[in-house]
Amino acid sequence: MKAAVEFINVTKIYDYKTPKEMIAIKDLSFSVKKGEFVILMGPSGSGKSTVLSLVAALCRPTFGRVEVLGESLSKLPDFHAALFRREKIGFVFQRFNLIEDLDVFENVLAPLVPLDMAYEKAKERVEAVLRRFSIDHKSSVKVSKLSGGEMQRCAIARAFVNDPEILLADEPTANLDSSLTEEFISILKKIKAEGKTVLLSTHDQRFENIDFCDRILRIEDGRLICS
């Protein structure tokens, strides 16, 4: 099966060649097959978020090569990287990154705005994804009024409104209690069953024993310690 994500001797150094330079990941190599559910596990500061940022083309490696869905992201111009991210990647951030002054519908609609899509078509797509993740009843509610679990569902709906091939989730349960974490895990299981590729970073031990995870990659100090 063809790789959805491949890291080849990747090193990422922030503020490279300055007094503030910081090595986030070093000489990292791994691959994720299409349809796999892979967990990046490690303590805070281990480099997990940097890995996801590289997969999403939010930053570029200092050395090495990152390939996602056959594209070499290291050489992709900014405009094309943004287009690739918009079309192929769904991202659920730790703090959700929702726009609090907008309602649920408007937050989920936001990724479609740059696509110059007809409003009626965009509206249908947003309504469908809101129903899919059981947040349609809050469509007109400002996200600042939502509970933690509702914000999570809104964030997932936004990540899926473009029907991405890869879902990235960065510490997605860091702000959720046990019951909401279990609810989120059940959503992930359905996403995995649909054949989506999922790469999730966490230090939450509750993910150790989920039955639909294909592999756990353990990272410490920017290095892969086992897989």
Image (cartoon, helix red, strand yellow):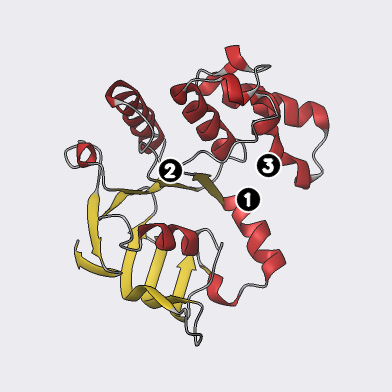
At numbered mark 3, what does the secondary structure look like: helix, strand or loop? Answer: helix
Q: Which mark is residue 111?
A: 3
Relative to residue 163, is residue 141 depicted above or below?
Answer: above
Residue 158 locus on image (x, y percent): 59, 35
Q: CA distance from mark 2 to mark 1?
A: 14 Å
| Nearest-to-viewer mark from 2 and 3 | 3
Residue 131 locus on image (x, y percent): 56, 18
At numbered mark 1, what does the secondary structure look like: helix, strand or loop? Answer: helix
Indicate which disc, 2 or 3, sits on the residue closer to the N terminus.
Answer: 3
Instruction: Give the class, few, some or many, for how many residues have Cα within 10 Å of label 2's Cα (few <14, many ≥20).
Output: some
Residue 23 locus on image (x, y percent): 38, 76
Residue drawn at x 35%, y 63% as measured from the top left = 47
Q: Which mark is residue 150?
A: none
Q: Which mark is residue 87?
A: 1
Q: CA distance from mark 2 to mark 3?
A: 19 Å
Q: Can you identify the residue that label 2 sits on?
A: 196
Instruction: Give the class, few, some or many, for how many residues have Cα within 10 Å of label 3's Cα (few <14, many ≥20).
Output: some
> Which amino acid lies under the numbered mark 2 shown in the image of this protein?
Lys
Indicate which disc, 2 or 1, sits on the residue closer to the N terminus.
Answer: 1
Residue drawn at x 16%, y 38% as measured from the top left = 209
Q: Nearer the viewer, residue 110 or 191?
A: 110
> Which amino acid lies under the numbered mark 3 shown in the image of this protein?
Pro
Q: CA distance from mark 3 to mark 1?
A: 10 Å
